[in-house]
């Protein structure tokens, strides 16, 4: 009888361990989900920033309308005013972009 009780408590212990492990796995997964979504947000913010970024003639990369290195205005398409995409022509109207 004592033997049986011992076995029973052993089984209970094992069950507890399994439960704890499952709990930990769930917790870890939700942590990972949380990290993933915040990483995604950061990447989106970075991408948005990159699209706003322009390189000034002074060599400084800026995200504002005016260069914070020399105060020059952000270059824009002379025809439609669109921000340059980095190519030689305006991405909106095809006007050749100046220097
Ligand atoms: Zn500048
Ligand atoms: Zn244009």
Image (tube, rainbow, N blue to C red):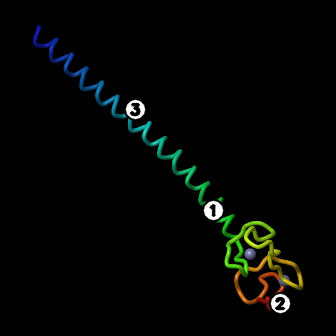
Q: Which mark is residue 23?
A: 3
**Residue 5: percent from the left, percent from the top?**
16, 11
Q: CA distance from mark 1 to mark 3?
A: 35 Å
Residue 42's image quarter?
Answer: bottom right
**Residue 27: percent from the left, percent from the top?**
44, 36
Looking at the picture, tell me which residue is in the foreground, 51 or 3.
Answer: 51
Q: Tell me: 71 left or right of 15.
A: right
Tag in front: 3 or 2:
2
Q: Tell me: 19 left or right of 66.
A: left
Looking at the picture, tell me which residue is in the foreground, 35 or 64.
Answer: 64
Looking at the picture, tell me which residue is in the foreground, 29 or 19.
Answer: 29
Residue 51's image quarter?
Answer: bottom right
- Near mark 2 (Cα within 10 A), the count class, few <14, some 14-19 or many ≥20, is some
Q: In the image, ligand 1 is in what quadrant?
A: bottom right
Q: Residue at x 80, y 91 (%)?
A: 96
Rendered position, 24 above or below 65: above
Q: CA distance from mark 1 to mark 2?
A: 28 Å
**Residue 68: percent from the left, percent from the top?**
75, 67
Label located before the other in sequence (1 or 3): 3
The residue pinned by badge 1 equals 46
Rendered position, 30 above or below 48: above
Q: Secondary structure at mark 2?
A: loop
Question: Can you tell me whether the CB of the residue at mark 1 lies under 8 Å from the nearest atom of ligand 1?
Answer: no
The residue pinned by badge 2 equals 95
Outermost residue to the bottom? 96
Label located before the other in sequence (1 or 2): 1
Q: Residue at x 20, y 16 (%)?
A: 8
Rendered position, 45 above or below 60: above
Rendered position, 5 above or below 49: above
Question: Can you tell me whether the CB of the residue at mark 2 lies under 8 Å from the nearest atom of ligand 2?
Answer: yes
Tag in front: 1 or 3:
1
């Amino acid at each position: 009888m004592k033997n049986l009780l011992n076995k029973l408590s052993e089984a209970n212990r094992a069950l507890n361990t399994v439960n704890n492990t499952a709990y930990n796995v769930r917790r870890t997964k939700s942590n990972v989900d949380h990290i993933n979504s915040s990483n995604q947000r950061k990447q989106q913010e970075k991408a948005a920033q990159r699209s706003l970024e322009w390189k000034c003639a002074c060599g400084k990369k800026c995200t504002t309308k005016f260069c914070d290195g020399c105060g020059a205005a952000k270059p824009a398409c002379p025809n439609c005013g669109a921000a340059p995409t980095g190519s030689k022509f305006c991405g909106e109207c095809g006007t050749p972009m100046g220097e």
